[in-house]
Amino acid sequence: MKIAKVIVDLPLMQTDKPFSYAISKEFQSLIELGMRVHVPFGTGNRLVQGIIVGIEEEKDAENSSVNLKDIAELLDVEPVLTEEQLWLADEMRHSVFSYKISCLKAMLPNLLNSNYDKLLKSADGAVSKWSQLTEEEKISSAKAVRAGQLSVEYLAKSKENRRTEKYLSIPDLEKLAEFEIEKRAKKRLELKYFLLRMTEEKIALKSLNFSSQIIKFFIEHDLVKIEEVEISRTKDKFEAIENDSAKVLNSEQESAYEKIIASSDKPFLLEGITGSGKTEVYLQTIDHFLQMGKTAIMLVPEISLTPQITNRFIARFGDKVAIMHSGLSDGEKYDEWRKIKSGKAQVVVGARSAIFTPVENLGIIIIDEEHETSYKQDSSPRYHARDIALLRAKWHGATLVLGSATPSLESRARAMRGVYELLLLTKRANEAAILPEIKIIDMRSEISDQSANFSQSLLAKIKEKIDKDEQVILMLNRRGYSSFVMCRECGFVVDCPNCDISLTLHMDTRTLNCHYCGHVQGIPQTCPNCQSRKIRYYGSGTQKVEEELREIMPEARVLRMDVDTTRTKNAHEKILEKFGNHEADILLGTQMIAKGLDFPNVTLVGVINADTGLNLPDFRASERSFELLMQVAGRAGRADKKGEVLIQTFNPHHYAIEMTKAQDYEKFYEMEMRFRRELSYPPYYFTVQVLVSHQDEEVAIQKSYEISQILKQNLTEKAKILGPTARPIARTHNLYHYQILVKYRFEEELESALNQVLELTQLRDNKNLRILIDSEPQNFV
Ligand code: ADP
Ligand code: ZN
Ligand code: ZN
């Protein structure tokens, strides 16, 4: 008899280990590692989902199968997790303080995490639904799948995220030909002849130039049939992109390329200024590994924001590419996952979670813009894609490349210590493109009666560029910033009733929204505090800036890109396409526009407010500001026209601003490292944060001290334990938050101490206590 080790889908400390189940005879030949099952659990034997993480022969097992419960049901006919993924989950559990089951589930496409049904299809077209089969039929079907006689397809229940289009076809051509239409009905006749000449089997309804009235007539007479067909967005996309071939590398690129393909001993840090041709190096190294029969993972930050870069991969590798991003529906993600698992795709391009995709035979992993915070997941499991990449590279003996114009201090410091190998690209790849010139505009001495947001010099420059038919990118930094409503009489600001934070004004919906808990309310006409009618809107949201711009420069064509204008699907791509076709002169946006855009006609980048992120209570505030400004500056002058960058600021002498002006990463790195060393912050120290939340503030405080005590008892004196302190935003979702930050270098007992902390939530008294443990936290606000 065999025994299965199963991790059940219950996020509890007590169930954070495998449970043993007997594998009954009929399942013996079917069960494999990485399959999902239903098992009876607890005294009530409730059926819960679980994942098989081990299979043992009974003689080696401590438990005898006689005392074990049986596995109740098989949910898969082939494993959904690979052995490597099971190992990854084990490894993750040591530094990501989430339950094992949540690590495992992070590796599965959503479609497999919920109870979607399956269709079994045989070669002759017979289809049966898994859920409607008896247990015996399931077992025999599973065997048939193994033998290749049946194929499996997971069925997405909800259609909401899918895109369908109506197609028209002709059921009976003769009938249509013979059908008489009065001569006077010109449009009907026209459609009839159009249809008779049609060569395709079916045609998209929206591509027809006939009114719905006319088409309805044909439907009513059974001359045409309408059906809804699901279309995959990624498919149109692939078809629309032209092929592209490799460029001749310049000497810096060549030397980086040679080193990357030569060794996988340690990770590479490819530090190259914006436009230095990093992406070309990625493309060619990936090509090298494909030629060797290997596969590649290419991570990019928030892929929905950077269609330009994904297009370059599709242009180079065509059908070999699978795209994984958050804009896809569950069904589409599942399709891409299948493409990867079946080996059809050899290059996965995707955002953070694409690091988990089950590619076999991995040759290279590349993380572009490695400093981006979106590589750290800010909900459970709180993993960093870089750490997972290191593990996967180890498993496969694969090469890991981290690329950036402004590497994170952590990565750059590792390169200095020789943990990573540093590769530098110091020149722009396109020789005609020199780095843009950056000017700082001191807003303290700019008094303008014309505008609240624009200095005279920026306005003049914008005008100059537009007159020359060149294009402009304007960035409004929204980090740490929001528009709000305040009473001019008494200073009252409208706050969220559940959170300690002011509500953000949304002009498009005319509402006040809480960005933490989602609370929405109308804009008050009078002050809720003093009843004055002098309610004013504060803050320069992108919308306000746009209005101002239109007033001052009515001739300029402006496109706006922010959360409000990109809510609908593919909105990003449409805006960027328009801008690329020069249908607008100015692209005005938030941080979204800082990343990855490559428009040759853009010769001016203006930063409206460089300051808002500088003074946040976060030790990375300067690093983030510097990175962002360098990124956005890199959008200017990428082709043969010279670029200019104007940065408006109230802090012209802040070192992050001064180093941006000098475009000097090295100097910034040096200064920032000094400050990190003085204050014992990363990369000199590791950090782990414990966040304690409770609806009763007293309890939150008391438990925080209890936890702080546990940490003190278990850690050495070298560890620095800060707090507990209230979070900068002390209350959200009606919960009070307290935080403890541990700074440490080597602490043997840390992992067990933190598990002990996690265990506190399991006590009956602590039912409403929430504890989050975040290793290397990226956000402190
Ligand atoms: P990065 O990723 O470092 O920002 P890109 O790879 O986007 O840089 O390169 C910037 C521009 O230079 C792109 O338009 C790219 O096509 C071009 N380019 C890159 N490498 C070369 C090369 N070796 N020869 C000619 N053009 C190149
Ligand atoms: Zn709220
Ligand atoms: Zn008031």
Image (cartoon, helix red, strand yellow):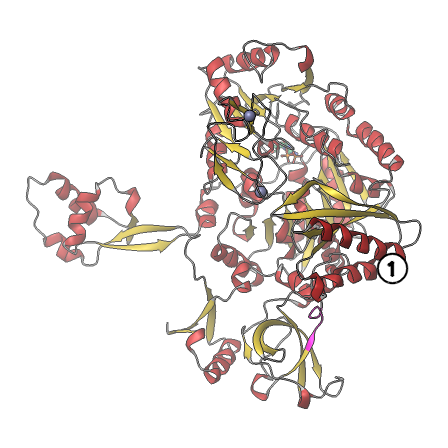
The residue depicted at 41 percent of the width and 56 percent of the height is 159
Quarter of the rendering occupied by the N terminus: bottom right
Is 570 positioned to the left or the right of 683 in the image?
Answer: left
Q: Which of the two residues, 709 or 89, is positioned nearer the viewer here?
A: 709
Is 693 positioned to the left or the right of 684 in the image?
Answer: left
Let me know if residue 586 appears in the view: no
Residue 213 is covered by the magenta coloring: no
Q: What is the magenta range?
A: 14-19
Residue 749, percent across and down? 87, 59
Residue 506, percent across and down? 50, 33
Residue 235, percent across and down? 45, 50
Q: Which residue is mark 1?
A: 749
Is 745 positioned to the left or the right of 387 in the image?
Answer: right
The quarter of the image that holds ligand 2 is top right
The residue depicted at 71 percent of the width and 87 percent of the height is 58
Q: Amino acid at mark 1?
A: Glu
The local crowd at label 1, few if under 14, some if 14 to 19, many if 20 or more residues have their Cα within 10 Å, is few
Res. 184 image quadrant = top left
The residue depicted at 60 percent of the width and 13 percent of the height is 455
Res. 371 image quadrant = top right
Label 1 SS? loop
Quarter of the rendering occupied by the C terminus: top right
The residue depicted at 69 percent of the width and 28 percent of the height is 630
Let me know if residue 82 appears in the view: yes
